[in-house]
Amino acid sequence: MATKEEIKEILNLALPAVGEMLLYMVVWVIDTMMVGQFGGKDSVSAVGLASEIIYTFSNIFIAMGVSIGVTSYVARSIGAKDFKSAKEYASHGIFLGIIVATSISIFLFIFAENLLKIAGAYGNVLILGKIFIKISSIGILFSMVMNVLNAILRAQGNTKTPMIAASIVIFINIVLDWILIFGRFGLPALGAKGSAIATMTAQIIGFIFIILYYKRYMVLSLKFNVLFKVNKQKIIEILKLSFPASLQEAAFDISRLVSIFMIMHLGTVAFAANQITTTIESISFMPGWGFAIAATTMAGQMVGAKNYDSAKRYTRISALFAVGIMSTMSILFLTIPHLFIRAFINDSEVIAEGILCLMVASIEQPFMAIGMVYGGGLKGSGNTKTPFIISTISSWCIRLPLMYIVIYILKLGVVAVWFVTAIQWSFEGITMYIYFRKEINKLKKRKEINGI
């Protein structure tokens, strides 16, 4: 039975994380809305496809890679009261983050056009998407390093500062979007290009804020000159956790990109409807990610302290909140889908298709919440291999084969694609739950056998 103190602790961690995630999704939503109102289907498709490519790389290698490894090790070190190790893992995580982020940024800038062509972009979508990626590749460098810095803060239980940083980024982004996309105050209307410039500027300012916070409050007594004192063993340990976590995200994101390429085959209307539905659904699963962060942090700290029952309880509390919030979104998707879709675009064909997609998306919300939170709990406990295996099976053995059948053999529309994702998330949610419980029970039994 969860205590009031445990519930309060989870909410103190999760709510700022949820707020942070929602803020980032708000700016993505508003970006899509403004670009859609300015340039229609081509602009929505260009910015949507370019953003998918950029954030796929960022998520695979940083947000769900290096950051997960750093969070797990720092949280477990803090749980074990080993603050020296926490500092060492943090500094090595930042070092890795800078190296990886710089490499990704350069790669995106150089191969922007090639990536879009592989995705099936052509004509105006290709031209606009290329401009968007090249400009955004600069901002994403700062955003990825900031993500690692935020992961260290979350591992200590500080989710409020990343939320404040997100607030700053979002405020600047939205204001600059309005000015640059539509050409206010005598400036030329830049459309998709203006959206990219606004995002880049906001990300750089957010990064500066986090750096100043680290210097002002001496987080874990870190001094940035320690980044050059590299301990090979620490790097290897972080990579051992980060690599499976990266592969898990890669399994999911690359399969999602392949899915998007398949959906491009259905035409611009289907792609625009899918992109808008994905954007709306992203708002609903942000609470799931927020509570997953809380589960990762608390499971990590409790496993570090060898308090396995508490690790299980904290994760269960996180899951209950996530399921409750995301199930509420399911009801809204079923009852008022037209209000969501019409906020993005005026095209009647896209609206009709998008409404049906969003209604189907309501099925997967509670399963998605369970999968996210219990997957986060597994990673916090130091097991990143199992989530990778589960995600690989759900993405490559369930999602893609079924999607191929739906699109190319049965020749059904984009609405059927969303039934496929509902099946995928149902499998993933149930399986993550089962294997989290197995992992905690295994650790608990090991403690009993070893007597420690």
Image (cartoon, rainbow, N blue to C red):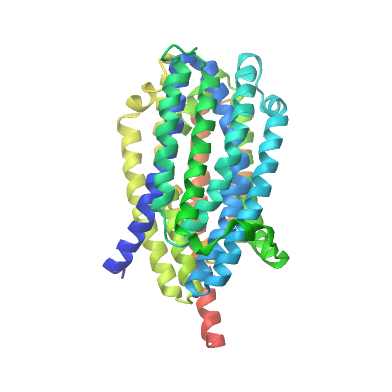
Query: Residue farthest to the left?
Result: 4
The spot of residue 415 in percent (x, y) is 48, 29
**Position above or below: 105 against 320:** above
**Position above or below: 372 against 30:** below
Q: Nearer the viewer, residue 337 or 342?
A: 342
Specify whether 167 is left or right of 54: left
Q: Is residue 435 visible?
A: no
Q: Nearer the viewer, residue 364 or 402?
A: 364
Q: Specify the quadrant of the image occupied by residue 140.
A: top right
What's the residue at 62%, 33% (across, down)? 137
The spot of residue 370 in percent (x, y) is 44, 54
* Quarter in which the N terminus is drawn: bottom left
The spot of residue 297 in percent (x, y) is 46, 62
Q: Is residue 246 visible?
A: yes
What's the residue at 64%, 44% (across, down)? 101
What's the residue at 50%, 12% (across, down)? 188
Query: Residue farthest to the bottom?
Result: 451
**Position above or below: 128 against 237:** above
Q: Nearer the viewer, residue 286 or 149?
A: 149
The spot of residue 254 in percent (x, y) is 64, 40
